[in-house]
Image: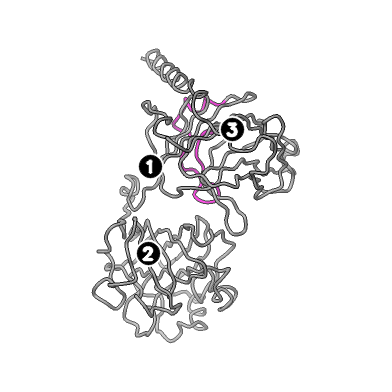
């Protein structure tokens, strides 16, 4: 049996090599001008990038974070090829469909270059966000594909929600994910710890034979049988099998608003809120709080829960995600509840109000400021998560914890006492409540809204 399996594995690898042996006949377009690096912008750290004879060489520099040589052009669906050689002391990667936060922090899909014993080269890591999406722990053939000390040939197919990678003709990753549709391509030189390991200073990673196909992808994509099953990490407004097993449920399926109603109303707002292309969008223009369509709340109430969603702001926008909303408080504005602030901090004056920044994005509004956050600029999707269990609540933004507090604690009640909420008894301490998406007079969009009960 073992001999048969080895024979079959060998035949599969041979078939992959044959399948890609015609790559020279494919219509590859160079990714950049071979005479200079003017088609790129360096982001992050200060590693040294040089171009000579068509080879890009990245060299590590001490006391600098991850460096990225990013294309000035954005790419959506494509087939990409490149060859790399890396010093065994250095971890590296190639970013695809990636972007940078307002402070320049690069995030997005990274096709791994890993010469260590772990051997996850070809895996897909979500830089500065969700970490590993598809490692090679269960792909022995993929882990053996990368050859240290030699040029290794990568192929990456990013088509729709599918991202597939190969090294030297062997499939390494087969990912389905709906997070990002486009972005730049970037060549990473990983930051190093020069004090712990001085030998890592001045080591190199090299790339050459870099080409891309962006048209007629169905003709040129790999059409054989995938030797490894697809790993479904996220789907647009759908749950993966793993999420279903963990008890998640969609609050918005991309089509219907049946799980929502207007705050203080029995029905969904007739105007302002719309469903378009799988997105729950709000169109407003007054800048006032709940003066147009009004906020919307879940028909159900939740006690202990984990809520996850993606949001997209427009320039200067203000909105919020409220929770433990009871609909009992009398107010002329939005319904009252604990609020995960959604705000364009750079353009909206409310970011400078409150105390110590507790009106900025991801803060517990008017109570606790967010921490050192990475947020994508208006027009781009961000991930928000709220976890509430046994009165302990956490806010996350793009995978990073921003706020942590305990409802009903002495510290919490002291903050409420000096806030705008001090007029309501036991504010934020309801045993259960609705989830609310706020209308604050600005355009804002939501998708992939899902929740799981933790009680």
Work out whether 288 lies above or below 370: below
- In this rendering, would 89 be left or right of 349? right
**Mark 1 or mark 2: whose residue is earlier in sequence:** 1
Q: Is residue 247 above or below residue 14?
A: below
Secondary element at image label 2: strand
In which quadrant of the rendered image does the C terminus lie?
A: bottom left
Q: Is mark 1 on a helix, strand or loop?
A: strand
Q: Do we see residue 126 in this rendering?
A: no
Which residue corresponds to mark 1? 232
* Displayed quadrant of residue 197: top right
- Mark nearest the camera among 1 and 3 is 3
**The N terminus: image quadrant:** top left
Cα distance in 3D space between marks 3 and 2: 39 Å
Q: Position of residue 346 (x, y in %)?
A: 58, 68
| Mark 1 or 3, nearer chain start | 3
Magenta segment, which residues?
Answer: 120-146
The spot of residue 430 in percent (x, y) is 36, 74
- Residue 136 magenta-highlighted: yes
Q: Kindly tell me whether residue 225 is visible in this rendering.
A: yes
Residue at label 3?
A: 210
Comparing 434 with 99, the one in front is 99
> What colour scheme does the image use?
one colour
The image position of residue 169, as x and y in percent, is: 49, 24
Q: In this view, does 446 lie to the left or right of 21?
A: left
Q: Do the residues labelled 3 and 2 touch (CB within 8 Å)?
A: no
Q: Residues within 10 Å of mark 1 (few under 14, many from 20)?
A: some
Residue pictured at 36% horizontal, 26% vertical: 225
The residue at which mark 2 appears reads as 281
């Amino acid at each position: 049996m073992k001999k048969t399996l080895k024979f079959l594995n060998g035949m599969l690898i041979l078939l992959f090599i044959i399948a890609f042996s015609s790559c020279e006949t494919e219509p590859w377009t160079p990714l950049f001008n071979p005479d200079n690096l003017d088609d790129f912008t360096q982001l992050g750290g200060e590693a040294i990038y040089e171009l000579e004879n068509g080879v890009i060489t990245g060299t590590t520099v001490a006391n600098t974070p991850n460096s990225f040589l990013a294309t000035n052009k954005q790419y959506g669906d494509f087939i990409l090829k490149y060859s790399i050689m890396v010093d065994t002391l250095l971890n590296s990667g190639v970013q695809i469909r990636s972007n940078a936060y307002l402070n320049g922090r690069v995030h997005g899909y990274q096709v791994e270059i890993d010469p260590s014993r772990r051997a996850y080269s070809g895996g897909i890591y979500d830089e500065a966000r969700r970490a590993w999406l598809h490692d090679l722990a269960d792909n022995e053939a993929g882990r053996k594909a990368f050859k240290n000390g030699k040029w290794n040939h990568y192929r990456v197919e990013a088509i729709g929600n599918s991202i597939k990678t190969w090294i030297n003709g062997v499939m390494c990753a087969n990912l389905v994910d709906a997070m990002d549709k486009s972005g730049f391509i970037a060549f990473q030189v990983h930051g190093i710890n020069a004090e712990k390991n001085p030998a890592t200073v001045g080591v190199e990673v090299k790339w050459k034979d870099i080409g891309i196909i962006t048209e007629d992808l169905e003709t040129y994509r790999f059409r054989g049988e995938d030797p490894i099953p697809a790993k479904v990490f996220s789907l647009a407004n759908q749950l993966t099998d793993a999420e279903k097993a963990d008890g998640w449920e969609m609050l918005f399926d991309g089509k219907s608003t049946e799980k929502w109603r207007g705050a203080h109303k029995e029905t969904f707002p007739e105007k302002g809120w719309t469903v378009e292309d799988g997105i729950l969008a709000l169109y407003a223009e007054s800048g006032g709080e709940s003066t147009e369509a009004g906020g919307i709340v879940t028909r159900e109430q939740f006690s202990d829960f984990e809520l996850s969603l993606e949001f997209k702001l427009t320039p200067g926008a203000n909105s919020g995600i409220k929770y433990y909303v009871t609909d009992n408080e009398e107010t002329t504005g939005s319904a009252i509840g604990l609020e995960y602030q959604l705000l364009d901090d750079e353009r909206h004056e409310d970011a400078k109000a409150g105390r110590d920044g507790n009106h900025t994005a991801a803060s517990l509004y008017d109570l606790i400021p967010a921490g050192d956050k990475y947020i994508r600029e208006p027009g781009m999707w961000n991930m928000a998560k709220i976890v509430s269990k046994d009165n302990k609540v956490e806010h996350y933004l793009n995978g990073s914890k921003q706020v942590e507090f305990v409802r009903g604690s002495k510290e919490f009640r002291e903050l409420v006492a000096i806030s705008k909420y001090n007029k309501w008894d036991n504010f934020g301490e309801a045993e259960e409540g609705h989830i609310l998406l706020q209308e604050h007079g600005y355009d804002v969009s939501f998708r992939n809204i899902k929740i799981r009960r933790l009680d």
